[in-house]
Image (spheres, grey):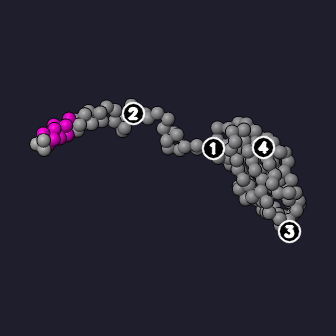
Amino acid sequence: MHLHSQIFRMMIGPAVLSLGLAACAGSSPTSSAYVPANISRILAPDAKEVIHSSCGDRVHIVLLGFVDCRFNEKNYGGNFKITIATKGLVSIDPKKGTKDTKFTVTGLLVGKGYFLIRDDRKNTLKVRVRVTL
């Protein structure tokens, strides 16, 4: 019985190896014809575009001073919506606009906070604000 299992292994081993080599001889991953399905999801799962701000992600304003900001995003031509989370620290006008809109951030109270910029694709940018004397 032991002799039969050794003979069987000797016959099956090369057969499995040759089948494996034949399967790999198809398209080579380095050839230009090889394109895996949905490669963007493999390389960057849930990748989102980034909202860019002309005033950065941190703004320092002197009390009653102002800063003008514009927001843009690659391959996006829709609206940006501002959500203020500063409890009266700053005023931002307007609250909604496109990449061409100038958003004016005015310091009303001394303190720290932030505001959010959102697009219609649910991308968000958090901008921290500090108002000083």
Distance Cα–Cα, label 2 vs label 3: 62 Å
| Most foreground residue, 80 or 3 | 3
Per the image, label 2 sits on a secondary structure element best described as loop
Residue 63 in percent (x, y) is at 87, 63
Examine the image and state in which quarter residue 31 appears: top left
Considering only order in the chain, which callout, 3 or 2, is on the residue closer to the N terminus?
Answer: 2
Most common SS among magenta residues: helix
- What residue did someone put label 3 on? 133
Q: CA distance from mark 2 to mark 4?
A: 42 Å
**Residue receiving disc 4:** 81
Q: Earlier in the sequence, mark 1 or mark 4?
A: 1
One can see residue 93 in this view:
yes
In the image as oriented, which residue stretches furthest toward the bottom?
Answer: 133
Tag 3's secondary structure? loop
Q: Residues within 10 Å of mark 3 (few under 14, many from 20)?
A: few
Q: Position of residue 83 (x, y in %)?
A: 80, 48
The residue that disc 1 covers is 49
Question: In percent of the image, x 74 and y 55: which residue is there?
Answer: 127
Left/right placement of residue 118 relative to residue 49 reads: right
Asked if the residue under mark 3 is in contact with the one under mark 2, i.e. CB atoms within 8 Å, the reply is no
Which residue matches tag 2?
34
Q: Earlier in the sequence, mark 1 or mark 3?
A: 1
Single out the mark in the foreground, 2 or 3. Answer: 2
Q: Position of residue 118 (x, y in %)?
A: 73, 45
In the image, the segment drawn in magenta is 4-15
